[in-house]
Amino acid sequence: MKNRIIRAVAGSFILISLLLAHYVSPNWYWFTAFVGANLLQSSITKWCLMEDILTKMGVKD
């Protein structure tokens, strides 16, 4: 369950930031890059802040 939520949040952040970059300001691409960098970092280190947040909220695996 946790992995599905993490993927949904990351995907939503990317899509929303792309829309904001297109319609509001190209600076939103930095947020897109930040989300991508966090996904890459979590694949290397096996640590994800969103997973820790969901755990503290009581979401089970």
Image: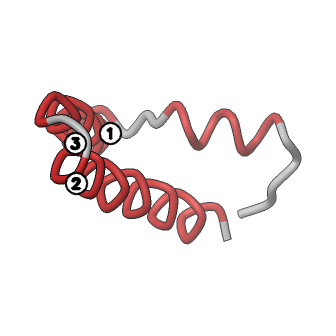
Q: Residues within 10 Å of mark 2 (few under 14, many from 20)?
A: some
Q: Nearer the viewer, mark 1 or mark 3?
A: 3
Tell me the kind of residue under disc 3: Thr
Query: Against 28, is 60 above or below?
Result: below
Residue shown at 64%/61% (left/top)?
2
Residue 26: percent from left, percent from top: 11, 36
Circles 1, 3 touching at the beta carbon (< 8 Å)? no
Residue 52: percent from left, percent from top: 64, 34
- Secondary structure at numbered mark 1: helix
* Badge 1 or badge 3: first in the primary sequence: 3
Residue 35: percent from left, percent from top: 29, 40
Q: Nearer the viewer, mark 1 or mark 2?
A: 2
Q: CA distance from mark 2 to mark 3?
A: 7 Å
- Secondary structure at numbered mark 2: helix
Tell me the kind of residue under disc 2: Leu
Residue beneath disc 1: 42
Quadrant in which the N terminus is drawn: bottom right
Residue 32's disc is: 3
Residue shown at 80%/60% (left/top)?
60
Tell me the kind of residue under disc 1: Ser
Residue 5: percent from left, percent from top: 60, 64
* Badge 2 or badge 3: first in the primary sequence: 2
Quadrant in which the C terminus is drawn: bottom right
Circles 2, 3 touching at the beta carbon (< 8 Å)? yes
Q: Nearer the viewer, mark 2 or mark 3?
A: 2
Nearer to me, 8 or 49: 8
Residue shown at 55%/71% (left/top)?
4
Residue beneath disc 2: 18
Asked if residue 49 lies left or right of residue 47, the reply is: right
Corner quadrant of residue 59: bottom right
